[in-house]
Amino acid sequence: MIGAGCSGSFQRARDIFGRSGLSVQKQQEVIQFLFHPDLGSLNILRNGIGSSPNSTRDWMNSILPVCPSTPDGPFNYTFDNDDSAQLALSQAALSLNPNMLIYADAWSAPGCMKTVGVDSEGGFLCGVRGTNCSSGDWRQAYSNYIVQYIRFYHDLGIQIHAVGPFNEPDYNPITYASMLSDGFQAKDLMEVLYPTVKASFPNVQVACCDETGARQGRTQLYELQKAGGSELFDIYTYHSYQSDPERPFNTPKQNWQTEWADGGGAWNPHWDVVGHMAEGHNWALYMHNAFVNADTSAYLHWQCAENDTGDNGLIQLAGDSYQVSARLWAMAGYFRFVKPGARRIEASSSVEEVYVSAFENTNGTFAIPIINAARFAYNVTIDLNGVKVKTATPYLTDNNHNVSRMADVAVHGSSFTALVEARAMKTFFLH
């Protein structure tokens, strides 16, 4: 297991830092809610690697303001020490958690490197199969571009943990940066990008390919492998918009769910009121299914926070006020207790409405999140299969509790019995 996270891309980090009136004090409170290990417990921040010529609401600045006409350059890179406020958000998150992981992901290559000549409107990277650009093969130039972004952060003392060259390459939104690719074309890029990244930053993980859904991701993974790209990535990434993670990905490498939110709904801060997909109780179940069904190691929400009436953010900002959604507490119900490096271990439930998973941390502690989807409470007996622990501390999340510590439960030998409230998530921390 790696952790949970969110993104400040598309200029939304600027919302956190007061673009719409949030005071400095409340900026700090929002950041604490998101990233403090004892609050939201998020430990992954997904930055967008910009490719656009300016910073309208959903665009992110390119580090190559003037695009050359050929892959030979010149490449006059520049960094504004702001990065659409993602730099400040990265620094703030790291101040709360020095082990914070930064995943830098590109929505597109700069326009000069693509078949359509702009970073929006989809198009393909020149040089991959199926393209015939008069300007030449831009795969190495794009790989160098991504490495330069890593270097700008590195020079400021911030280590990038992972990078990816695509965002939803199976979807063309027209209005913001996008770049299309199938798995065969992804292989053509990855065979250049992977060694280029490793040559400069051997410890940076290379991710692919952030498709719109898990099923779409499995299809693209099959194509990437069929083309000979099985060893050209370290992490396989997907989103959950188009399809759910119903079964494992056909790779021994980690898979991460790196973006999802309702996207089209009104702001919903609730745990369980009307059963909406964005409510915290359902979000906890989505995470359970990803971990148990698809062996997913990390789970990221779309935006961290934004000044908007929709529910794309974990926290809604409105002038100098904010509201925290229960989705954040669902994520904390896992990752306040499931630490990076933990391994998911076998767990099962004999009751259809009760969902259980279990994780062993590297220090020998255990986390057992249990989700009761029924509308009545259950007394559950947890059999630890011979594992001896001293204490079982439950943390309750429901309509009235946000990962609230409850009274310790007595452990008898290697089992204990405890109440799990209706429509609730209760995480048992065993130590």
Image (cartoon, rainbow, N blue to C red):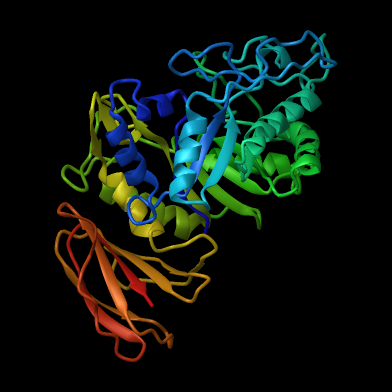
Q: Position of residue 58 (x, y in %)?
A: 46, 19
- Which quadrant of the view contains residue 268? top left
Q: Quadrant of the C terminus?
A: bottom left
Q: How many marks?
A: 0
Residue visible at 36% across and 87% down? 414
Which residue reaches farthest bottom? 413
Residue visible at 81% across and 14% down? 73
Is residue 170 something one can see in this rendering?
A: yes
77 or 265: nearer the eye? Answer: 77
- Which quadrant of the view contains residue 131? top right
102 or 92: nearer the eye? Answer: 92
88 or 54: nearer the eye? Answer: 88
Q: Position of residue 345 (x, y in %)?
A: 49, 71
- Which quadrant of the view contains residue 27? top left
Q: Position of residue 37 (x, y in %)?
A: 39, 55
Residue 91 lies left or right of residue 34; in this view the side is right
Is residue 239 something one can see in this rendering?
A: no
Residue 196 lies left or right of residue 291; in this view the side is right
Q: Position of residue 310 (x, y in %)?
A: 29, 27
